[in-house]
Amino acid sequence: MRAVSASHFGPTSRAAAAKALPGVAEANQDNEEFVIVGVPKEIFPGERRVALVPAVLLNLKKVGLEVVIESGAGVEAGYPDALYVEKGAKVAPDRKTVFATADIITQVLCYGANDSTGKADIPLLRREQALIGFLRPLGSREVLQEIAATGVKAFSVELMPRTTRAQSMDALSSMATACGYKAVLEAADTLPRFYPMLTTAAGTITPARVLIVGVGVAGLQAIATARRLGAVVSAYDLRPVVKEQVQSLGARFVELPIEAENAQDARGYGTAQNEAFYAKQRELMARVVAENDVVITTAVVPGKKAPVLITAEMVKGMQPGSVIVDLAADRGGNCELTKPKETIVAHGVTIIGTINLASSLPHDTSSLYARNLTAFLQHLVKDGKLNLDMSDEITRETLLTQGGEIVQPRVREFFSLPALAAPVKA
Ligand code: NAD
């Protein structure tokens, strides 16, 4: 991508759009190089987050990034237009202007992750434009090819390496933290019991028992939250390495007499197991599930349908009034009875198939996401220019499409696309 100076607006729609936003050009009359970052309003139904918040704009400005925000984009997260203007952003009257003006579009749920209304953005994307956000890189090949066909350089935040260097850019962890926390609260809100032990004049109430299945970032936050609320917490994961982390949070690690083969891949993710393993796992978990009042499931494997770990029979074995929150609902669900986006009651047990829980804490999740994106933009932009160094792991791993093609090697392999003949050049 070419950085654009104010005097270099060619006869493009970007120039025309920039004229419609005089502040952008005027702010750069001194002819400094600058890149325009656009923030459209999220269009996934019910989505309340926004990609950038006012507090990060100063840091973006320092690396030569000007922000154009669609009017009202931050309102649902508690960031009205005036707060962005105060920090130097320009407000565009509509979505089309944001896409036409910006060199880099930042979104929370791009087409791909937004399988409901995201397609509407395809005609708005331009070759040589960059797009950053959740794109569901192991979702649908056809959708990714549609995005690629626009020529856009799409960066998927899901592909961020889980390394110490990339930690500040790790949006998956930020959102998973919110999901784990909120799942515990949703369950508490539904459970007809207290979480903590209460000693009252009317006698003692025993604490609720909470089981967390899948101990990644969301699971760990769920354990910590349930513990803070006074529940008795236990947790299970097929990766035995998490045992210590579970115990350090004051929960009991559930050990099942079954060992997963290569439980963890090189990047630290849990791996898919064969059906015999899952069958044995379900059999062994039945008793553990029945002993708990709340079960929060987060067990997923990248690029695969979530394993079914709780059967209808196991639900039947739970006490009436118990609650299951299935955080894997949008990946098919860890509970056989889960209905994505719905809350149902089966055998007296409430099963919450919530999706997109991170959107229910939009003020803080937008703030965390904006900080992740700011760190990422600071990494990608040098001296007011998008500067893609393909020898850098963070850039190489996250660049999903470029020049009309899906270019990320692992994603190509996942979709059985042949390896590209030449390495990707910036
Ligand atoms: P995730 O959302 O991919 O998966 C959630 C959990 O489900 C995982 O712990 C997985 O082992 C578990 N799981 C899968 N199948 C299961 C089954 N059949 N039974 C029980 N559990 C099952 O996880 P995540 O939160 O994205 O974290 C993935 C890994 O990345 C973890 O090792 C985590 O510690 C690591 N991580 C590292 C960093 C970093 O170093 N910067 C940051 C975040 C996460």
Image (cartoon, grey):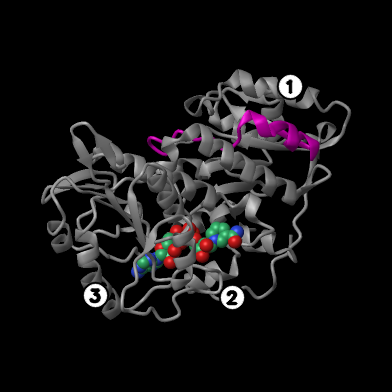
User: How far apart are the alpha carbons under marks 2 and 1?
Assistant: 45 Å
Q: Is residue 98 left or right of 291 when viewed as pictured?
A: right
Image spot of residue 76 (x, y percent):
47, 27
Count neighbours of disc 1 (C-alpha within 10 A) and say few if under 14, some if 14 to 19, many if 20 or more.
some
Q: Residues within 10 Å of mark 3 (few under 14, many from 20)?
A: few
Counting from the top left corner in percent of width and height, residue 40 is at 55, 34
Residue in view at x 25 percent, y 58 percent = 335
What is the secondary structure assignment of the residue under circle 1? helix
Rendered-image quadrant of the C terminus: bottom right
Residue at image mark 3: 279
Any magenta on residue 57?
A: yes
Q: Which quadrant would residue 203 be assigned to in this image?
A: top left
Q: Is residue 324 visible?
A: yes
Please say if the residues under marks 2 and 1 sit with CB atoms less than 8 Å apart.
Answer: no
Residue holding disc 2? 419
Question: Could you say which quadrant of the image residue 104 lies in?
Answer: top right
Q: Hey, which residue is sitting farthest right in the picture?
A: 30
Q: Which residue is most to the front? A: 201
Q: Residues within 10 Å of mark 2 (few under 14, many from 20)?
A: few
**Residue contact at pointers 3 and 1, CB within 8 angstroms:** no
**Disc marking residue 23:** 1
Three-letter amino acid code at disc 2?
A: Ala
- Residue at 38% from the left image edge and 35% from the top image edge: 46
Which circle's residue, 2 or 1, is located before the other in the chain?
1
- Label 3: element kind: helix
